[in-house]
């Protein structure tokens, strides 16, 4: 699944629009690994050093930008 993002970190943290839609839709991923693989789509300039994770956040498996494909898990 391709997920739009406003910001991301290299630990799989994703900053979205604040509605929590993707976290609710993929909540089952907190308890088990892919599939589906969750890939954030954005620009390299959106990378942040660290995003605070909340208990309901679902981490990304990778991020794709115009500069690189960044695998997060395995």
Image (cartoon, helix red, strand yellow):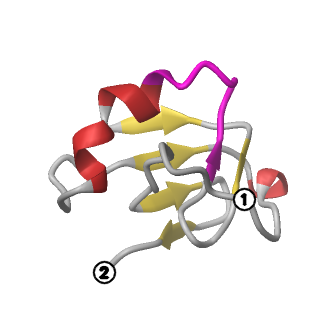
- Residue located at (20% from left, 46% from top): 36
Residue 18 in magenta stretch: yes
Q: Position of residue 39 (x, y in %)?
A: 42, 50
Pointer 1: what residue? 52
Rendered-image quadrant of the C terminus: bottom left
Label 2: state its secondary structure.
loop
- Residue located at (46% from left, 72% from top): 72
- The span shown in magenta is 14-21
Rendered-image quadrant of the N terminus: top left
Disc on res. 71: none
- Residue located at (84% from left, 54% from top): 45
Instruction: Report the number of discs.
Output: 2
Pointer 2: what residue? 74
Dot 2, crowdedness within 10 Å: few (<14), some or many (≥20)? Answer: few
Left or right: residue 17 versus residue 12 is right
Residue 58 in magenta stretch: no
Q: Position of residue 28 (x, y in %)?
A: 22, 42
Question: In this view of the protein, which residue sits in the foreground, 4 or 13?
Answer: 13
Question: In this view of the protein, which residue sits in the foreground, 32 or 45?
Answer: 32
| Whole-number angstrom distance, CA of label 2 to CA of label 1 | 21 Å
């Amino acid at each position: 699944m391709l997920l739009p993002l406003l910001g991301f970190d290299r630990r799989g943290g994703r900053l979205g629009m604040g509605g929590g839609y993707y976290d609710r839709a993929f909540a089952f991923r907190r308890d088990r690994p892919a599939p589906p693989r969750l890939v954030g789509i954005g620009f390299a300039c959106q990378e942040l050093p660290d995003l605070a994770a909340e208990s309901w956040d679902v981490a990304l498996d990778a991020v794709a930008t115009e500069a690189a494909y960044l695998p997060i898990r395995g």
